[in-house]
Image (cartoon, helix red, strand yellow):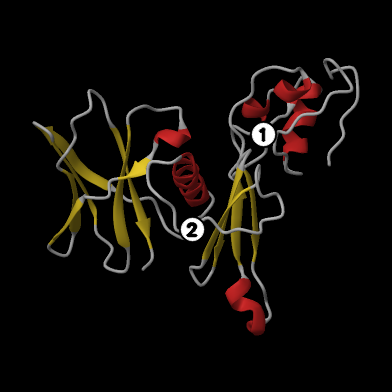
Amino acid sequence: PFFICGPAVVNPGRTNTTPVHLVDVFSTILELAGINVAATLANSTNAVDSKSLLPVLQNQPDVARYTFSEYYSTNATFTTNSGRAIRNADYKLIRQTNGTEFFFNLAADPYEGANLLPLATGTVAWSNYNALVLRLADFQSVLAAPTMLSNGLSNVVFNVSVTRNPSLNYALWRAPLLGNDLAWAPVTNATIITNGTTSVILRDSNAVSAALYYRVMATTP
């Protein structure tokens, strides 16, 4: 539980289910003090994950929030239990260092008793799983983002070429609109072509939507 009281709280005495992390206190205090967070951090070389809770305090619409945590054991006995976790309002994804994943519907299963994996595609749970996978990728800094070399659309075939790293796997994702994390999904029938030693071509042969947005994800095998 997290309690906030003060003159900035609109309609006090209410309960809100917004996921909150301790780091959010940083941006919240700055905004309450009238300080522009973006301008203050403009020259910072450190990534700041803090998201102000002021919209929540003022009972206004808020952006989708994610809570992230990680744990890396220094005890060799428990190395396989190390990993990262991320959640949104209703779902939580845990990915251990050994690749094992757990996915829970916190709204229906708050004590995380039933791992939902593997999932059926096209479901609400599947959309939330994909959204959490993408957000989890944003919190890693070990792998650099793939470098795009070229892209193009011919009829219903979309190709994107990226610089190849032989130690990585590549996947193509797409969404019909931006601004909605639940719209993203991997292109399950994408063709991955190794173009010599320098590049990889990812192809979607069914780019039939009026507008599609793509991203390339690189992962270790």
Report the front residue among 101 and 149: 101
Among the 4 quarters of the image, the one containing residue 16: top right
Give the residue at x 67% y 34%. 51
Q: Are there few (<14), some (14-19), or many (20+) residues within 10 Å of tag 2?
A: few
**Residue corresponding to mark 2:** 117
Give the residue at x 38% y 65%. 220
**Residue corresponding to mark 1:** 51
**113 sits to left or right of 115:** right
Give the residue at x 26% y 67%. 166
Give the residue at x 58% y 44%. 45
Kindly give the residue lying farthest to the left in the view shown: 155
Provide residue 6's location: percent of width, then percent of height: 91, 22
Secondary element at image label 2:
loop
Provide residue 77's location: percent of width, then percent of height: 65, 84
Q: Nearer the viewer, mark 2 or mark 1?
A: 2
Report the front residue among 120 and 136: 120
Secondary element at image label 1:
loop
Disc 1 marks a residue whose amino acid type is: Lys
> Which quadrant: the N terminus?
top right
Provide residue 205's location: percent of width, then percent of height: 14, 42
Q: Are there few (<14), some (14-19), or many (20+) residues within 10 Å of tag 1?
A: some
Report the front residue among 184 and 45: 184
Among the 4 quarters of the image, the one containing residue 144: bottom left
Provide residue 208's location: percent of width, then percent of height: 18, 30
Q: CA distance from mark 2 to mark 1?
A: 30 Å
Report the front residue among 99 and 144: 99
Residue 211 to residue 143: above or below: above
